[in-house]
Image (tube, rainbow, N blue to C red):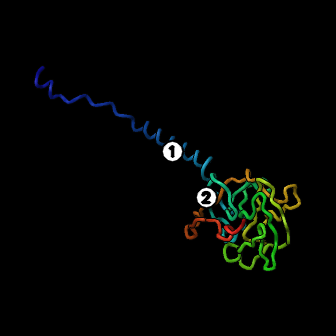
Amino acid sequence: MTVAEETDPPAPKKKRSALRETVVFTVGGILVAVLVHLFVMQSFYIPSESMENTLLVNDRVVVFKLGGIDRGDIVVFKGWDGEDTIKRVIGKGGDVVKCCDSERRITVNGTPIQEEDNYLYPGDYPGKTFEVKVPADRLWLMGDHRTNSMDSRSFMEDEFDGTIAEADVVGTAFARYWPFDRLGFFSSPETFSKIR
């Protein structure tokens, strides 16, 4: 073997095509985005005033599609007309939701919920009196702007007393991302933790 043969550099390895890498990463990114959208998170805009002042017209929220549903959560669901709708969960299966006590508060299982200082539209109230036992696997839902909301109260004459099936819930709203000056996260108000 000659010296020249010993010092020759090894043949360069075949480089992967930059175009092929770009295609793989692009397709992979699209696939991940589609899977997240289908199974984990989804974005919705607010078309009405029924959740003021918590949510304003044209706000954008992100909902989380996994996990359980609790009283006080804001949920997106297939509404009474079949369209995506957003309201607050007041009662779950087995709960007795009643309006109202002597201070015009809604009670759940006899426990009044303090809404005025938390999320209820200023000066608002539920309107008509009612008492409903929420069927199993269903939800009683209300807008935060009670006098401007078509919610469970408006459909009490149907076979399910205005409740929605838990299976019709798309997800729980956990953040408002638009407009940027109203960016924030949602959590269930403390008042719901007192309900037994």
- The quadrant where residue 19 appears: top left
Image location (x, y in percent) of residue 118 = 66, 74
Tally of numbered discs: 2
The residue lying at 77 percent from left, 75 percent from top is: 105
Toward the front, the furthest residue is 196
**Neighbours of disc 2 within 10 Å: few (<14), some (14-19), many (20+):** many
Label 2: state its secondary structure.
strand
Mark 1 belongs to which amino acid? Answer: Gly
Q: Which is nearer the eye, 18 or 49?
A: 49
- Quadrant where the C terminus sits is bottom right
Residue lying at the far left in this picture: please name it: 3
Query: Amino acid under label 2?
Result: Val
Vertical placement of 30 versus 173: above or below?
above
The quarter of the displayed image where residue 182 is located:
bottom right
Query: Would you identify the image quadrant in which residue 68 lies?
Result: bottom right
Foreground residue, 194 or 47?
A: 194
Mark 1 to mark 2 CA distance (whole Å): 20 Å
Residue at point 47% right, 38% down?
24
- Expressed as whole percent of the image width and height from the top left, the position of residue 22 reads 44, 41
Q: Earlier in the sequence, mark 1 or mark 2?
A: 1
Tell me where residue 64 appears, x and y as whole percent. Answer: 62, 55
The residue under the point 78% across, 62% down is: 95
Q: Mark number for residue 62? A: 2
Element under disc 1? helix
Mark 1 vs mark 2, foreground winner is 2
Q: Nearer the viewer, residue 17 or 68?
A: 68
The image shows residue 142 at horizontal and vertical percentages of 76, 65
Q: Judge the density around disc 1: few (<14), some (14-19), many (≥20) Cα neighbours within 10 Å.
A: few
Q: Quadrant of the N terminus?
A: top left
Q: Which mark is residue 29?
A: 1
